[in-house]
Amino acid sequence: MSEQCNNGAPLAEEKAILEEQALNQQAAIQASEDDHHQHLLGHCHHHNQMQQHLEDAKQNLASTVNSALKAEVARATDTATDTAIDTVSSQTRTVKLPLVNVFAKGGYCVQMHLGSEGRPANLIVDTGSSTLVVKKQVYRPHDDQLLQPGPFAQQVIYGAGGWDGPLVHTKVSVSQDGLKHDLLAQDSLDKNTTTHVPHLNLAHEPLDLEGCPVAIVPSLEHQKTFADADGILGLAYYGLNKSYDLSAYIEEHKINPASTFPWPFSEPNSVCPAHSDHETKSSDESDEQDSFSGEDLKRFRKFLKKQPQQTVVPYFTRLKNNGLTDNRFAFHSKRSSIHIAKDDFTQEQIAADPLNKGWLILGGGKEHTELYQGKFKTIDVIHNRYYNVKLYSMTVGDQASVAAPALQEKYIPSHKSNAIIDTGVSGILLTNLLYEAMLQGFGNVSEQFVELVTPFKDIRLQEEGIDMTELFKGRDMTGHHPNDLSHWPTLHFTFDGEITNECPDKENEVIDKAITISCKPEHYWQLNCPKPGKACFKVLGQIDGWPNQCLLGLPLLNDYYVVFDRSAHETGVIRFAEQS
């Protein structure tokens, strides 16, 4: 939202305020078309959707930080977006935060600290949304001396679930004491203290963002959306983070205190229907005339739709605007489902498994050589709402490639492109054409492969899996690792690459118009999931009502160190390098 609607949470510099105002004007134009996309994206969102219904989105984890260094925010213009290229100090810090995947059924969570009390919250890392949202009982907002309430509310509805609640502003922090025990990173630092992981010697200093927008979910039913995680950290772009101004409603109904916190819509009949319904109801919808509460997501959505909208500047954009990090972040993961090595393992033992860990590096990129090897492959982000990319084709093994269908014209305003890269999706969702091409490609190798994957069209099988031994039947495993899946073909996805004259780093990047990113069988199959000796297939076909758009989640990312570089060009790029 613009600074005047920010309830006393000003940005650090005047230029950032001007940029935010320009961003708000642009985002408001996009708000209605993005709303439909946000609703549909729930079919595949927030990590437990691939294991429950593809829509739902404690071990304490330390976070990593560095001391703040000065940065100059780029001059805002009338056409500014939150991907505007910043002129920042080369000394801007990176913040290396550990991830674990045990809370969100395979989705990766980062621990952040909220408010004056620094309450820890394990939040799902999600590049398919932009909101920082947390469960009320985890945050404990009534204890927060820094909390700034206001008249704004937020809501997100997914295909099966969702949430609503008040928007407040408070301090959000990340900190890390454990990085000194990260031997790989320390080794990199020892080799070259000038260019490798320069933040390590600053790791004990917290990174604080004052006046950060935080949505609170008071409803226990709505909180089920997050599984055992405490909420979501949305890392997508500015335009997705909508809020609704309830000032007029609060004044008319004399709500005291005059804000959305404490949440005034929890009790039954706490919303007047005269302020919620869009049109006259038919006789069989007479119950719609009754009062309701925020628990009723659909009716409360209609109520919110009648209120003025404001777009909220998200957490990561605020970090960038305040010069705390560069306008990029990196994601490092190993799995898309929890690896369970033994039946009797505790949650602590499962979380300690290296396969269930990862990294989120705010402001980070090529300097973290401890996490990758070789050159980066770079694909273009063609629209800065989600991380929209253009998918050219898919190839099964060394067979002929199959062209990816174009996004239907009627969906272009809302969906933007035929593919999205999304850390908040714990599988890969293909269009029907590509899914059938995958099955045919598998069948060309072995008909048994088709028989094994086809039952996973029923999402409920993700909760059961099949015996791992089924994947190796008929294969001579002599000389092979017991879990070697190399007899299954690799899936190759070819995207629109980065062609630029802006000083390309040819030494460290592969520069080409067509860039291929591969998903190996050990990633589209997850072994020892959901229990030891079981396996789950993580590629699904198109959901009814979904357009020709592939949602490319964790299985495609698990073999790579992935840098979401929003500073490149007008809309950003995504860089992939093989993990070390």
Image: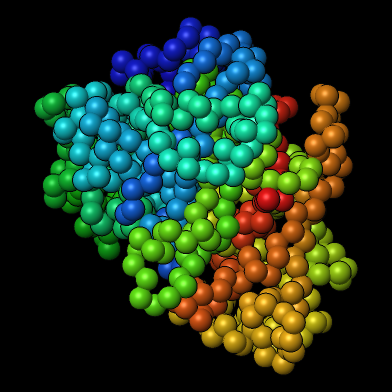
Above or below 341: residue 562 = above
Above or below 29: residue 509 = below
Task: Give the colour scheme of this rendering.
Answer: rainbow
Q: Residue 210: percent from the left, percent from the top? A: 36, 21
Above or below 31: residue 346 = below
| Quadrant, the N terminus | top left
Q: Residue 234: percent from the left, percent from the top? A: 47, 40
Residue at the spot 13% in from the left edge and 47% down from the top edge: 267
Residue situated in front as seen by the camera: 526 or 303:
526
Instruction: Determine whether, in the image, residue 34 is placed left or right of residue 389.
Output: left
Residue situated in front as seen by the camera: 340 or 248:
340
Residue at the spot 56% in from the left edge and 13% down from the top edge: 71
Residue 288 appearing in the image: no
Residue situated in front as seen by the camera: 18 or 319:
319
Residue at the spot 71% in from the left edge and 28% down from the top edge: 568
Residue 11 appearing in the image: yes
Total residue callouts: 0
Residue at the spot 43% in from the left edge and 18% down from the top edge: 2
Q: Residue 156: percent from the left, percent from the top? A: 39, 46
